[in-house]
Amino acid sequence: MRKHKPTRPRAASISPAAEYRRGRQAGYLAGQEEGYLRGRANFLFTQPQEPLPFRQIHILYVSSGKGFPYSPIDEAIIATLQTLAAKVSVTDPRQPLVSQAQELCPDLLLALDGMEFPLDQIDAVRAMGIRTAVWLTDDPYYTDMTLNMVVHFDHVFTLEFNCVELYRQHGCPSVHYLPFAAFTQHYAPLATRSKVQKEVAFIGSAYWNRVYYFNPIMPRLMSKDTVINGIWWDRIPDYKLYQEKIGLGTWLGPRDTSKIYNGSKIVINLHRSIEDDSVNNNQLKMDGVSPNPRTFEINACATLQLTDIRSDLARFYEPGKEIETYSSPQELMDKIDYYLAHEEERREIALNGLARTLRDHTYSSRLNEMLTLIFP
């Protein structure tokens, strides 16, 4: 007698009406979570900030002269200085700076980056008794060049903590640690849902250390709803497998970047390396311990930031509360999985990071600190 194989129970079929109700409920919950995040972020963003001192001084601001991507920093500094000083005049390194200084008689000449600055002109301006300062943009990656330049300024401001003592030992008496910040006219939480909706985002150039870091986890990373934007990402060995999710060759402006940050549940930050001699000029191999400008810009958009650990990070954000960190590619992916499954925890860290940024890490707070040091 033939034995019959046991039959498997049929999966209960879901009616179209039940499927509709399930989808509607999921959409409602997602919208509720998004609305809650947007509402709280907007509340934090619209809170009045403590007024900062307004100084009766005239600042001659010298832009980097390099164009994009430095021009958004120029824009942030100029707009902020105009709220802190009675008069701000703007020029660039290609102009006759000595004659401009003679005509304008500013209280301070402030240069961004300074790499394009004719050093004989800064010496001539100093000889007039005008205070001079430079805010360096790329420490420690170009110290081969900045070491010869900084001694020509009265005050040096660097965004890398390790460079402070280096410049002091090189003969600069007034050197200060002053990282960049978030310019909230560029980076801020959107009041409404972003048109770009992603689970994970990374924006930045494919320096070789980033290629080596991401390559082992690319299948797992790109299995998420992930977007990557930046130059050189065709360096990834299996680039063709992921090219639909990679904006190759794009160097996004701040507002487009902010839209992606706002629309992503998680934004990855991975600092560049001092070991890449193809792009660096750092023969001393000065190590980088300070957070990059993206650290503040990502948090200003009320999104969860996952960043590699830098030893000076805790000075600015409390890990696990205002920002999240990782120390290996495996840990990065594990935390992506965790926070995509734990919306409430993700949201609270994002909102705490926003609140801390608005309180301590805007260009207003940074430039007020700079002017307090120059005009005590």
Image: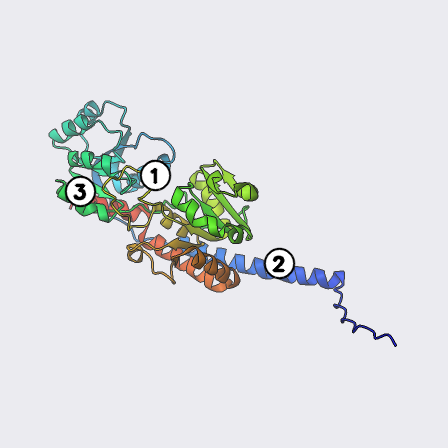
Q: CA distance from mark 1 to mark 2?
A: 39 Å
Closer mark to the observer between disc 1 and disc 3: 3
For the point 13% across and 44% down, which residue is it? 169
Q: Amino acid at mark 1?
A: Ile
For the point 49% across and 62% down, which residue is it? 338
Q: Nearer the viewer, residue 164 or 174?
A: 164
Give the answer, above or below, for where 135 lies relative to 320. above
Q: Which residue is mark 2?
A: 27
Secondary structure beneath label 3: helix
Residue 29 shown left or right of residue 101 in the figure: right
Q: Is residue 234 visible?
A: yes
- Disc on the earlier residue, 1 or 3: 1
Q: Is residue 46 visible?
A: no
Give the answer, above or below, for where 59 lies relative to 226. above
Q: Nearer the viewer, residue 306 or 69?
A: 306
Q: Amino acid at mark 3?
A: Tyr
- Disc on the earlier residue, 1 or 2: 2
Q: Which residue is mark 3?
A: 167
Which x, y percent locates residue 329?
43, 55
Q: CA distance from mark 2 to mark 3?
A: 56 Å
Secondary structure beneath label 2: helix
Q: Amino acid at mark 2?
A: Gly
Give the answer, above or below, for where 134 lies relative to 34. above
Crowding at mark 1 (Cα within 10 Å: few <14, some 14-19, many 20+): many
Quadrant in the picture for the N terminus: bottom right
Which x, y percent locates residue 282?
26, 39
Residue 73 shows which numbered tag?
A: 1
* View extreme (front): residue: 1
